[in-house]
Amino acid sequence: MVETNQNGAEMQNGAGAKTVKAGEEETLHDVIVIGSGPAGWTAGLYAARANLEPLLITGDDYGGQVSITYEVENYPGFPEGLSGPDLVEKFKAQAERFGCVVEYDHVTEIVVDEHPFTVRTAQSKEYRTKSLILCTGARPRFLEVPGEQEYTGKGVSYCATCDGFFFRGKELVVVGGGDSALEEGLFLTKFATNVKVIHRRDELRASKILQSRAFDHDKIEFVWNTVVTSINGNENGVVSGVTTQDTQNGAEGEIATDGVFVYIGHIPNNDLYHGKLDLDGDGHLIADPFTRTNIPGVFAAGEIADKVFKQVATSVGQGCAAAMQAEKFLASLEAEGLPDLNEDPRAWPTPGVPSKPAELVAAD
């Protein structure tokens, strides 16, 4: 099928097709994947195996959250476990084996109110694509207390795997009560003499197996019902302690420490989407169970849309689903043309297929 844009230029629908624009030739991609975490690599793999010749743009946070995880023990197929960076490299190698093209770049803008969609990057590149799979993930949430920004890199860290080695023989504080806090706290015991886990409640949210390991470890102790209100430094410009407040009686306290590792959740990386795609109150992309956003041809997978499970395994499944949905969407383009971009595909009765295809709307 041959489509025409609003200027009458022809756009052929094959994989890696070309579109003529203003006297120059540029590649029109079938699918672009934004993000290089588990969801992104899986989307790239499945799209490549469907002969869609996907382009995956890694972003600055290469590998996503799993890339800074010391050990992954709960991903199927690896009974002995493996490091997060090792898992990311295996994802990448498998996707590339089937033809996924990787660009080490950062997306600065997407245009989704005209078709083909436009993707612009920090390296001043511009891409056109018939479909988008958004896997931009999430980033660590900050404490937002005095001293945090000042001492980041000088005792404040969000990655034990990255920085733990520098605290050999030191006393450390971990802030948080979920899986990440305990996983990284346990890792830090390889270097630190003592790790205090500060948690705002009197019970943890972490999995039972991690709780058991932490409670049994002689280097870990817990400070319950407590929040950090300030991170303090010494004359050398590095962390020397934290000021705390009891969440029940308001009493203030001081804890001496050489480092503060913060694990209090994540914020979705949604800077590209404001005013363009539906976001929920927490800033996650709103996608239906078929990974469809409110724009036909734009799909979301992984922690940018998942506020409940947030696991490597679930992100992989969502990346797979997004690629399969993109393939169905592209097939509908071949057969019937683009649906109205103002029509919310989450209301379509058949996954990936519009109920009443509209006249093609193409970019200038």
Image (cartoon, grey):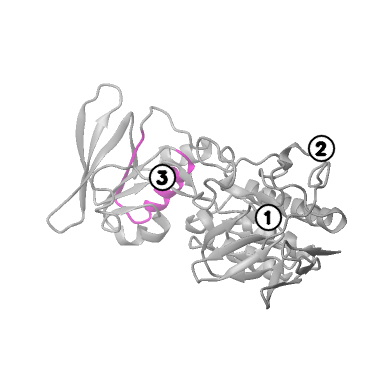
Q: Residue furthest front?
A: 7
Looking at the picture, tell me which residue is in the foreground, 272 or 351: 272
Three-letter amino acid code of the residue under disc 3: Arg
Closer to us: 307 or 131:
131
Mark 2 element type: loop
Bin the neighbour count of mark 2 within 10 Å (Cα to Cα): few under 14, some 14-19, many 20 and up. Answer: few
Q: Say if 18 sits above or below 115 in the image.
A: below
Which badge, 3 or 2, is on the more N-terminal residue? 3
Q: Which residue is the site of mark 3?
A: 141
User: What whole-number distance in Å separates the C-alpha atoms at marks 3 and 2?
Assistant: 37 Å
Q: Is residue 252 left or right of residue 159?
A: left
Mark carried by residue 77: 1
With 220 as the anchor, is 12 left or right in this view? right
| Nearer to me, 163 or 44 | 44
Q: Residue at x 43, y 43 (%)?
A: 182
Q: How many marks?
A: 3
Q: Check residue 195 for magenta coloring.
A: yes
Residue 113 position, x and y percent, is 64, 52
Q: Amino acid at mark 2?
A: Pro
Q: Give the number of the mark in front: 3 or 2.
A: 2
Q: Are marks 1 and 2 in contact (CB under 8 Å)?
A: no
**Residue type marked 1:** Gly
Furthest residue in direction top, as rendered: 249
Q: On the image, numbered disc 2 is attached to which residue?
A: 349
Q: Residue at x 78, y 54 (%)?
A: 360
Residue 74 showing in the rendered view: no
Magenta extent: 178-199
